[in-house]
Image (spheres, coloured by chain):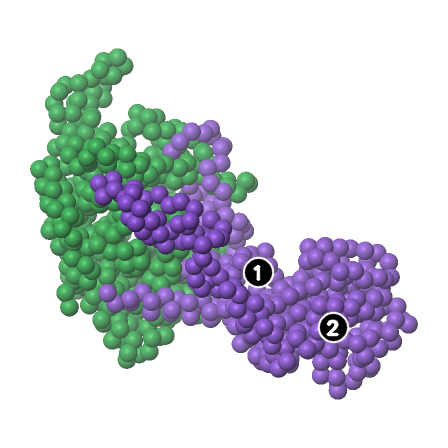
Chain colours: A green, B purple
Amino acid sequence: MGLHRFEPLPADLAALQVEIEGHARRYGLDFFATIFEVVDSNQLNEVAAYGGFPVRFPHWRFGMEYEQLSKGYTYGLQKIYELVINNDPCYAYLMKSNALADQKLVMAHVYGHCDFFKNNYWFSQTNRKMMDQMANHGQRIRWHMDRNGVDDVENFIDACLSIDDLIDIHSPFIKRHAPVERPKPAGDTDEDAPRQPGRFRAKGYLDRFVNPPEAMAAEAERLRGEQARHEARFPSKPTRDVMLFLLEHAPLKAWQLDILAMLRDEAYYFAPQAQTKIMNEGWASYWHSTIMTRQGLTGQEVVNYADHHSGTMATSPGRLNPYKLGIELFRDIEERWNTGRFGRDYDECDDLTAKRRWDTGVNLGREKIFEVRRIHNDLTFIDEFLTLDFCRRYKLFSFGYNPDSTAYEIESREFPAIKERLLFSLTNRGRPLIAVREANYKNRGELFLEHDYSGVELQMDYARDTLVNLQRLWRRPVHIESVLDGKLAVLSYDGTEHNLEHSKTPADLATA
Amino acid sequence: MVQRIERDQSRFREIVRGRIRQNLRQYVTHGEMIGRKGRELVSIPIPQLDLPHFRFGKNGSGGVGQGDGEEGDQVMPGDANGQGEGHAGNQPGQHLVEVEVSLEELAAILGDELELPRIEPKGQANINELKSKYTGIRRAGPESLRHFKRTYKEALRRQIASKSYNRERPLVVPINEDKRYRAWKTIEQPQANAAIVYMMDVSGSMTDEQKQIVRTEAFWIDTWLRSQYQGVEIRYVIHDAAAKEVDEETFYHTRESGGTRISSAYKLCGEILEADYPASEWNVYCFHFSDGDNWGEDNETCLNLLRSKLLPEINLFCYGQVESPYGSGEFIRALRSGFKEDEEKLVLSEIRNKEAIFESIKTFLGKGK
């Protein structure tokens, strides 16, 4: 079965592709071979429902997404302009009904994405044959469905998808596991010696008052106990890759393990896209606008192009448009590095007039943005390049939920507040940081997760139902520790009912 | 391309149906549907269709936006169903997905769930409905029905014939006699029609809560009957001591004080049927809702009217006695003793509260009349 399921590219579009690809290469973009498929709106909605893949495993959620997309399209609420798959070769879709000027824009945009996929570090560990792998996953899951029944398999998939964001997005780049964990002979290293309680410095004759022996003994005892608990703890360190942890330790059947492993692979494949949304869209928009305005457009296409470009860049108060933020940041970086507005001299200059006129003529802009697109993800991109000037120029503000008015309201236009909000929303793709803390909680094989609370509480109804799904995978009671109403709390589900325990201090729980 | 999505889509719809079925009693009871009634489709919230994830709640959450505005200005409304979250409890999750379902499908689910029998329309009730169908072309008609292609062809033909057509400048301008219009023919189609007459007691003892119950129940009755007949006509009668025919809006919102004389409504109902819905052509359904507090001597009149005038002419007469804060009346007992069990066309139901609507619908429609 070939991957080409749609119509071959008609001659005019094929010629267009050669032209746009040529422009992209001359600008130094570097991409995998790119295959464009022409599809009608139904096909595009279908492919989009499957996350861009023409073949995927069967699941009702894709049907739901398709319905929502088609409805949005029918009512004119939304229209998908471009869809690209990170694969070698890259696949991209062109909507049949688009005008030629639109197709050009889409192609130029797509080459930006393809370059980003190939060169951005965060994509470096993704499977470039994902098109094939997705098809294989589909095949295998259908096979499991034939053997185990559609309902059982689908229910199991539901449970897996419910925790498919509990992965460790940095793990492809860091070795977390020691290859084999062998017990070391006792007393072999200092680490194994019981920790000594800290002593306050004191003159010899004062020592037994400053560090009373009874207190020291009690403290030593406490430390021993803590260490023992720590050693007995499994896993020894909190692990964020909950999916992997379940793969290695949950009592699942072979077919269930197979499905969980496949869905975990898919989750890791999609993770970098969520990590680089602003950069990726910004980069693609930067290039479509550069190519189109300098080479691509004919006179009669300008209005059409301008209309669609401005549509893509439109902003609304409650939502930050990643296309707009991304392209403007790239332009800002290019401008700063062209004029030398970076580094110590510029930062330490107090003369506002001089700063405003600053131009060392170094012209490093283009080079710099290529470097940025290689190294960064959204989090580090914003952290490094969002400036006070930029926030002012683009009228950024931070907003928050006000329970009194039950609405989101503008909180601040102060640069640090804005940056903090933005960084928070980008941390871990905007999802709560959750890890397995204990797999043998209460010595009863119960699973204990911890939420690394950073100021925003979990949404309880979702948390409850996620626990239900987690329990279906772990088969023993599951717990999550988080903060609720400002107090530490443990939400539990034992397979039949939920339970919520508030505790006053973290210490209460340590001894529980 | 293989349309894989169709299978996933039908799977999704199957799940939606299942969830609706699970929650049907709740939808029926809370009358959520009525406010959402569109033309053909209702949009209903299906709980727990969304795949749950651990995610942030609203409190403390927020983001970064762009544009003008002062501190404190609202940028987005928080949606209503977020209220009260974050509190402890054992309720299942509230996350909802809105799904559109056709009223017809909803009726089918309701029918399945209540085990409602399909209605066999009365044999002689098949009347011929007149229906317009576009069948041809004619020379005159409204502009909205102009057939562009045929008009163009005529104009082109005329211009070529009169040698006014210029190949270099192919401009074709139709004049009046070129214009062609779609023509329709009226055809007769056999159709089973039904008429519903709703009667409601609006005397002082019927409160808004009772009326809400009536309204909810009537919505489901409508939905079911519409799924069984091609054409359904609905009339509304309100009464206290006297009866009058009103429109739907008035029906649900009128409140009168004073006494109750149910027979006035039955009499008016009989007149409506006689005038517009002869038994030979119509399947007639009458529903009467009251708290049952009737003038004592009026009960006998009601029984007589039912026996002699209404019941012989109609498919079904349903009386729903809605319990009011003032207690519930005697009328239902009068009907019970007046007719015993032998009268198949008369169905009685006591509706104590909202929760009883579900069973009441089943009682009313469960006979398949």
Q: In this view, does B118 lie above or below A160?
A: below
Question: Mark 1 belongs to which amino acid?
Answer: Met
Residue at 55%, 71% (x, y): give it. Answer: B188
Tag 1 secondary structure: helix
Q: Say which residue appears at 17% left-offset and 37% top-offset.
A: A296
**Percent position (x, y) of residue B149?**
35, 53
Around disc 1, counting alpha carbons within 10 Å, would you say few (fewer than 14), some (14 to 19), or many (20 or more)?
some
Which image quadrant: the C terminus of chain B?
bottom right
- Horizontal relation, residue A114 to residue B334: left or right: left
Task: Give me the residue at 49% from left, 32% from top.
Answer: B72
Mark number, residue B319: 2
CA neighbours of label 2 inside 10 A, class few (<14), some (14 to 19), many (20+): many
**Place of residue A21 in the rendered image (x, y in percent of width and height, measured from the top left):** 12, 43
Query: Label 1, on which residue?
Result: B33
Query: Chain for mark 1?
Result: B
Q: In which quarter of the image is residue B107?
A: bottom right
Q: Distance between the residues labelled 2 and 1?
A: 23 Å
The answer to whether marks 2 and 1 mark residues whose Cβ atoms lie closer than 8 Å is no
